[in-house]
Image (tube, rainbow, N blue to C red):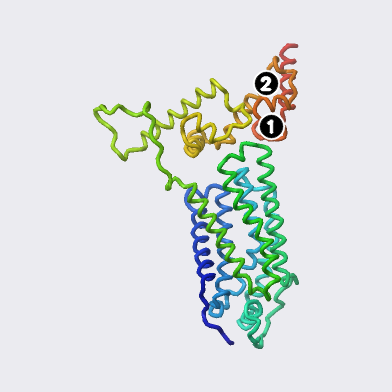
Amino acid sequence: MQTLPIHLDLFALIIFLGVAQGLFLGIFFLTGGRGKNMSNRCHGLFMLVLSAISGEIVLNYTNYTFRLLWLGDFSEPFNFLLGPLFYFFVFSRLWQRLPHRWGWHLVPFGIWLINSATWMYQPIEFKYNSYINSQHPELPFIRQHIKWEDDFTGLRDFISEMTLISCFIYAILALLAIRKASQQDPTLRSSAKWKALRLPSWLFALVPFLIALVKPQFVNDVGDYLLATYIAITIYTNSFLVMSRSDFFRDEPPVEPNIMEPESSAEPKKKYEKSALSEEVEDAVLTKLARLLEAEKPYLESDLSLPKLAGRLNTSPHHLSQLLNDRLGQNFFDWLATYRIAEAQRLLTDAATANLKIDEIAERVGYNSPSAFHTAFKRLTNQTPAQYRAKDLGGTAFRQRA
């Protein structure tokens, strides 16, 4: 068997570093408390799949596969995980759960995983021929012995086309999920969640177009290094987004004077003793929030966003979000929906507003979209607004008859 020397250049370095960074991100999202979050698990698995696919490409590109022929095409089934995992990540980030019947999305991966056994357990000569056919068509084939049919589906020659279609479908599904969520909750567009999903979604949406652009320009898989370079850029972008949202790189906000202890205190706090002071800061912000809710009911404003509310409380959006999650157990959108729906329930059952249409009530409590109001009401009460109103009116009539 003829082999070629190791080939290293700038592309190999970029792809290799992308693989390493993807492995790090995958492990990061899947471990510790982060791994308890569904979107983090999907994100971590997506990063590991990207690393596996790029890892095989860099082995092929550098000719190192000649020394690891037994690994040939090991990542091919993962092509059918790219789309579903990215869609799961976006969906669970928006809704804190996986889509209904999510297991069906993994059927193509399962079929291709079974199909991979038909070439993974072939003789080394078969794997050598397979490798040079895809990466070095200028080299001569060697005589081989095939143990059994190497592709029971008969579709392996169309793996690039199937990958393109899969990525295209799931990119559209992810973008539609983001659009639907923003229609149901207009405040989403001003949130950090929106910004964190928008760029990765568009980067992923470019993948099928790059496949369609690169594949026809090269024989077999010779141009895969260009796709792997783009994958590396995607991984670097994810790393940047993670770091940009990290507390490690943020300065601590100045402590408000009215909640600090007097400088003349007999036993001043130590410089690094932050836990008690942090709790006092949180209590102060929560007190301000309670007063604001009672006096102004800002949740009824249709354009209320996390940054706007944080500005009225003299704190940062990041710290307000963390406070809502840690102390109230809700993200901003769930917190906002809770207050709006509570107000809607009051209006639906109040005799003074019994003549209001449900769409008018939706507008009064801050929803520009009636469908967003109905979705939020159903999610929090397990009833539609009409059912809630009818049930209450029925109970009122019963009490009057009694």
Q: Camera-side residue: 383 or 160?
A: 160
Q: Position of residue 347 (x, y in %)?
A: 67, 21
Q: Quadrant of the C terminus?
A: top right
What residue sits 68% from the left and 17% below the top?
A: 350
Q: Camera-side residue: 200 or 38?
A: 200
Identify the image quadrant of residue 11: bottom right
Q: Amino acid at mark 2?
A: Leu
- Mark 2, other Cα within 10 Å: few <14 / some 14–19 / many ≥20: many
| Distance between the alpha carbons at the discs numbered 2 and 1 | 17 Å
Q: Can you say whether 87 is above or below 96 in the image?
A: below
Q: Position of residue 382 (x, y in %)?
A: 68, 32
Q: Amino acid at mark 1?
A: Asn
| Secondary structure under the numbered disc 1 in the rendered image | loop
Q: Quadrant of the N terminus?
A: bottom right
Q: Position of residue 400 (x, y in %)?
A: 73, 11
Q: Camera-side residue: 289 or 330?
A: 289
What residue sits 72% from the left and 30% below the top?
A: 384
Q: Tell me the number on the disc at residue 368.
A: 1
Q: Tell me the number on the disc at residue 347.
A: 2
